[in-house]
Image (cartoon, rainbow, N blue to C red):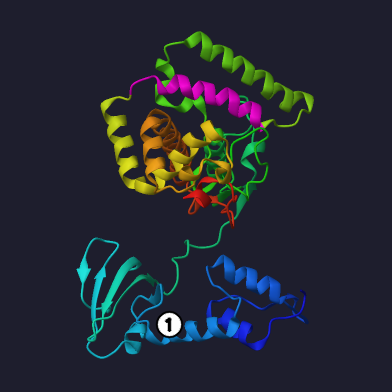
Amino acid sequence: MTAPPGPELSRLAESYGVATSYQPSPDRTVAASATAVTLALTALGVDAGDPAAALAARERELRERLLPPTVVCWSGSPPAFVADLPEGTRLRIATEQGETRSAADQLPPGVHRLTATAPDGRTADAHLIVAPPRLPAPPGRSYGLLVQLYSLLSHRSWGMGDLGDLAELTSWAGRALGAGFVQVNPLHAAVPGVPTDPSPYRPSSRRFPDPVHLRIEDIPECVQIADPDRLRALREGAERLREAVLDKGALIDRDVVWELKREALELVREVPLGPGRRAAYADYLAEGGEALEDHATWCALAEVHGSDWSRWPAGLRDPRSAETARARGELMDRVDFHSRLAWLTESQLGAAQRVAREAGMPVGVVHDLAVGVHPEGADAWA
């Protein structure tokens, strides 16, 4: 069915924020088909089989609800949503900073939790986003470099550019060229497999980086590996990869690079963390919380069941199920391994930013952000 949606289906779509047309150019408007609009509503959990009944239910819901799921206001301005609440409604705001307030005025910027209780007993919870009127601008104008990190090879790379190379580039560009920033491609965690999905814009997770970008030698525990001969053999393999790319015109083989680094990281993980490093890792785990645990759990489960979570046993498709909790316990060693990889990678990315600032860059590293995530990946599962 390619006919455009009727008036009731169009109003229903509008009430849920679903567009019924788009403009490929300023002088042309293309109407979405009724089928496309219905499928979009279905993905949002809306039964649009009877648009009139669904619209009536939606309008009733909108009339009766106290708050939408998310409320946005600007810091320093009176929040407009308060005027729409029944007189006498009580507010409770748990701020991102850990405070509890009963008024919406003069809130700090952040993502807060808002609870409203009306005089008739109705309650509603919402995310309250308080945004500054504008973001701070860097002092003056500056220029910078744009690089694809995987192609930024040096004579220390393991077959593709890494975060050590990024730190070297930022230091040189800031000190020698007066550059204000270095922008890199998305460094998000990729969906594992052979071959790995080649697009940095379809990552497994946008929240955590890919450990393929690690420089192994810059990990402090690397020098204490118990099997230095095995590490030396891995380095020799990496050297052959690097020479093939730099001197012989070979293409970068991300999958082979990762196999070498993954084995080296398994050796690194056998080295106990010192007291200070262990405390830093504990802080990272606490800060990452459930999101980090979900990501690491997905990585561990993917090693056992493959990367497409929709094909996993039914109980494991839900990150909050009892089956997933049991599997997480059984795979805790692998969950910890993937949590530590995220920590090491974010640490080296942070080090590159510090080097950039020390080199005089007013902005530093600019990290491109993928618009979406892979449907088979960790974020979609979580």
In the rendered image, residue 59, in percent from the top left (x then y), is placed at 48, 86
Q: Which residues are magenta?
A: 254-272
Spot occupied by residue 324 in the image (x, y as percentages of width and height): 41, 41
- Does 279 appear above or below 4? above
Residue 106 can be seen, yes or no = no
Quarter occupied by residue 176: top right
Front in this rendered view, residue 310 or 271: 310
The answer to whether residue 234 is visible is yes
Q: Which SS does the magenta portion mostly show?
A: helix
Quickly name the residue at label 1.
61
In the displayed image of the protein, which residue is found farthest to the bottom? 87
- Residue 211 is inside the magenta segment: no
Q: Residue visible at 43% across and 47% down?
A: 319
**Eyeballing the image, is 126 above or below 29?**
above
Residue type, label 1? Glu
| Residue beneath the point at 34% across and 82% down | 66
Look at the numbered disc 1 and give the secondary structure of its residue: helix
